Amino acid sequence: MYSDLFSQLDAGRLRHLITLEGLPHERIAALLDRADALRTASRGGTRTLDLLGGRTVINLFFEPSTRTRTSFDLAAQRLGAHVINFDIASSSASKGESLLDTVHTLEAMHCDAFVVRHKESGTPQFIAQHLRSGAAVLNAGDGNHAHPTQGLLDALTLRRQRPDTGALRVTICGDIRHSRVARSDVHALHALGVRDIRLCAPEQLLPEAGEFPDCGIFHNFDEAIDGADVVIMLRLQKERMQAAAIPSEAEYFARYGLSSERLKRARSDCLVMHPGPINRGVEIATDVADGPQSLILKQVANGVFVRMAVLAELLGADKAATMRA
Ligand code: NCD
C-alpha cells in the first residue's frame, strides 16, 4: 500500500500526518510547542477555542479505540470544529462498500480532515493518495506501522517532566514487533535527542534485525531496566500475533512484567509510561500502574493538546490566533 512518491509534506507545509519517520526534528518540536500553547489558550481544556470554527473532522476508526478516538473528538471540538464519529458497524462498509467508495462518499459531503485507524499498515497513506479534495489525513494507528500522535504525546509528556531529554535512558519493554507505538515513540525520542534507547522483548516479539539501528536490543528486562530514567511498557498485541507467541501470561509477567520490585533496578525517580489500554498483571502490576511514578493518565491528558496542535497545523489555523486566544 506504500508509495515512494507519497510525501506528507508539500512545499514545506504539513498536509497529512501519517508517520513521524523522516519528519524534521524541529517540526516535531514545533508541534509540541503548539500543544503547550493550546493548553494555555484553552486553560487546560476548559475553554473552547474558535480556531477551526465551521470545519469538519471525520473520525474513521476501523479498529477499536477508547482514548485515541475520544481524544481526537475532544480536540476537534475544543477547536470549534464539527466532528462526525463514523460508525463502521452500522455503515455501508458492512454491506461490502469499498474503503475508497466510503471515503469518496464522505468527501462529497465536504470535510476537512479524516482521522483514520485501521488494522492494515498503510491504509491512511492509501486514503491520502486517493482523496479528491484537499482534506487532510491523520493516522490514528495503522497495523504495526505507526501511531504518530501517540509518539508526539509521549514526547510531550516526557519533555514536560524531564526537559533535559538528551541525557535520558529510556527503556521500552513489551511486544515491540507488533507495536506501532514503539515505532512512533522511537522516532519521537530521537527528535527529543534521546540517545540511550533500549528495546526489550522476548526473542519472538523483537523486531526484525536492523530495524532499529540506533537502539540497544535486550532479551533480559532486569538488564534493560538497569539505571533507566523512563520505562515505557507495551501491551501484548494479541490481535496481531499469528499464534500464541507467549507461553502463559503468568510466565510473561514474571520475565517481562513491570513489578515494583523490578522497578527498583531503575533510577529511584524513574518515570513509568504506557499508552494504554493496560493489562494489569500481564505487562504491569497494579501498584506500579497506579503508583506515584506512573504518568499513564498524564499521557492521556496530553493527548488532547497534541491532537489539537496537529489538527490546527494541518487545517491551517492561524498560529497567531492561538497566542491571542
Ligand atoms: C495503542 C494502539 O492502539 O496502538 N493504544 C493507544 O492508541 N493508546 C496501544 C495498544 O493498543 O496496545
Image (spheres, rainbow, N blue to C red):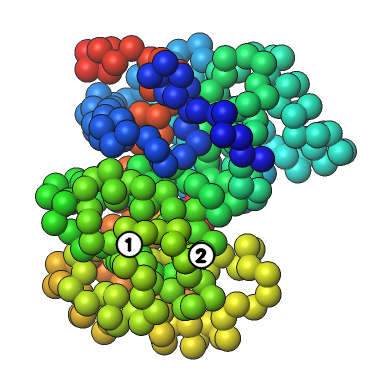
The answer to whether 315 appears left or right of 144 in the picture is: left
Residue bearing mark 1: 215
Give the camera-side residue of 283 and 181. Answer: 181
Asked if 62 appears above or below 280 in the picture, the reply is above
> Residue flagged by tag 2: what amino acid is it?
Glu
Q: State the residue at coordinates (41%, 87%).
A: 254
> Residue flagged by tag 1: what amino acid is it?
Cys
Give the camera-side residue of 267 and 294. Answer: 267
User: Given contact means CB atoms under 8 Å apart, are the residues at marks 1 and 2 in contact?
Assistant: no
Image quadrant assignment for residue 302:
top left
Q: State the residue at coordinates (37%, 52%).
A: 185
Q: Under 8 Å from ligand 1: the CB of mark 2?
A: no
Q: How many marks?
A: 2
Percent across and percent down for residue 278 are: 46, 65
Provide the secondary structure element on which disc 1 rests.
loop
Residue bearing mark 2: 208
Gap between marks 1 and 2 measured at Cα: 13 Å
Q: State the residue at coordinates (28%, 57%).
A: 295
Mark 2, Cα crowd under 10 Å, few <14 / some 14-19 / many 20+, is few
Give the camera-side residue of 66 and 144. Answer: 144
**Image quarter (top left, top right, bottom left or bottom right) of the C terminus:** top left
Q: State the residue at coordinates (57%, 19%).
A: 135
Asked if 51 appears above or below 18 in the picture, the reply is above
The answer to whether 115 appears left or right of 150 in the picture is: right
Provide the secondary structure element on which disc 2 rests.
loop
Percent across and percent down for residue 169 are: 21, 63
Asked if 59 appears above or below 261 in the picture, the reply is above
**Residue 290 visible in rendering:** no
